Amino acid sequence: MVAANRYPTESLKLWKKAKELREQYYINYAQAHDKGGLRWSGSAWALDAIPTAFGDDVYPLTGEPYAAAISHDRKFAKECMEAAESVGFARDLCSYMRIYWGAMHLNKYLLGGEYPKPDFVFQTQICCSHSKWYQHVAKVEKVPEFYLDVGVGPHKDLTEDRLSYVTSQLHEGIEFVEKATGRKCDDEKLIRAVKNEMRSTSLWAEICTLNKAVPAPLDEKTMYSLYVLATLHKSSQWCADFYEELRDEVKDRVARGIAAVPNERCRVISDTQPPWAFLKIFRYLEQYGAVSVGSLYTFGLEGIWETKPDSSWGPRTVPWEKGIEIRDRDTALKLYADWNLSKPQWQHFYDPRLKTEMMKTIVKEWQVDGVMLHLNRGCEGLSLGIMENRLGLANAGIPVMTYEGNMGDEREFDEVRTQARVDAFMEQLGLRKLAA
């Protein structure tokens, strides 16, 4: 007997465009010098509106999504990590960092050809690996480097002094890029970039709130290919404009009752980066009629949120919608610093209880039945306090399962064992596999 679908489904109309934008991003970086442009490298959390202010021909290569893209190619990823290990780096370091370093030492680029050397490094420091990652890049490639410290405590405790500390570093960052490139900062482009980043990150949060609907219009495996655009270049015009289009399409899916998983009967969330080489684990969930509607990672890596007047979690309101105009550099940088310091995924670096409370909010508002925690050996930062999170969720009566793995190093993921743990978790939730 074939299990009947409960809801209509259809492909995302913007799927092809999302893939094309991502591919063009990597092409633009590789070909920047051929067109007289500049290249810079840093993390997905780098405050990239600063370099963007120096021209529309300044292209970034953000390390984490680049390494994640490589990790889909298990053979190349393994080659990269072995190259990093052969240089002397330990296997228990961040797997993204090892993949990036390995590709650099191999002089191989994801899209083929030689690795395109950046003109400078512009990096934000919050994760334990961030500055050391790009210190090695700058040393090997012999390029100037700048590091911006944003470790000033959780946003709820932000003071004027702490905000000024980060804002002053943004001013220093502009001076650094001017010296490194010989160009002058264009304040009009800076303000545009800051506004675009605010648009991108607020819109992504709004898109994620639409997944509160039943059935969920998006599943997390699909969302990975959509949130990644903000990790590439969130201050760009193309990113902000795409998310506006995507928001409208997902709204339409909700209005028409279009489901990501047509047999949805159970909703879960995950946590931290997934094992990129084994994303089929999310398709395995569908055999039970289970859909992963997202995670704090998917929602908050680049989405910017706030608590609304009705106490619900929603996209942070952009300044100009509150009557705050951005007309000069000082205002732009201060608002930009505050905006980024409220990033959800930065909060739990200071106290795991902050993450637990955010996850409990998601469970409640997204009508989640259970939580799948990835004990991710590949990322020390986002796995920080994860067992405290497990205890906090369990104490709140929320069903939780854990599985071990590594976001980038497929040598540390046991597919059969993980499927067995999923089977046991689904049984705990009272579910059996649906008839094929």
Image (cartoon, rainbow, N blue to C red):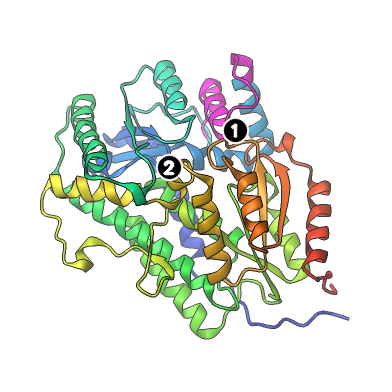
Relative placement, left or right, of 343 versus 186 is right
Is residue 36 something that shows in the picture? yes
Tell whether position 379 is magenta: no
- Which residue is outermost to the left? 328
Horizontal placement of 313 versus 53: left or right?
A: right
Q: Residues within 10 Å of mark 2 (few under 14, many from 20)?
A: many
When the figure is inspected, residue 210 is found, relative to residue 163, above or below; the finding is: below
Q: CA distance from mark 1 to mark 2?
A: 15 Å
Q: Which residues are magenta?
A: 85-109
Q: Is residue 11 above or below residue 144?
A: below
Residue designated by label 1: 95
Disc number for residue 307: none
Which residue, as the protein is rendered here, is positioned at the far front? Answer: 395
Residue 108 belongs to magenta span: yes
Q: Position of residue 334 (x, y in %)?
A: 20, 46
Image quarter of the N terminus: bottom right
The residue nearer to you, when weighing 362 against 26, is 362
Name the image quarter holding the C terminus.
bottom right
Q: Position of residue 146 (x, y in %)?
A: 31, 27
Residue 225 visible in rendering = no
Rendering coords of residue 106 (x, y %)? 56, 22
x, y (%) of residue 301? Answer: 46, 50
Residue 248 figure quarter: bottom left
Q: Amino acid at mark 2?
A: Ala
Q: Earlier in the sequence, mark 1 or mark 2?
A: 2
Residue that label 2 marks = 44
Crowd class of label 1 (few under 14; some 14 to 19; many from 20; radius 10 Å): many
Q: Residue at x 62, y 36 (%)?
A: 378
Q: How many numbered badges does the structure rendering display? A: 2
Q: Amino acid at mark 1?
A: Ser
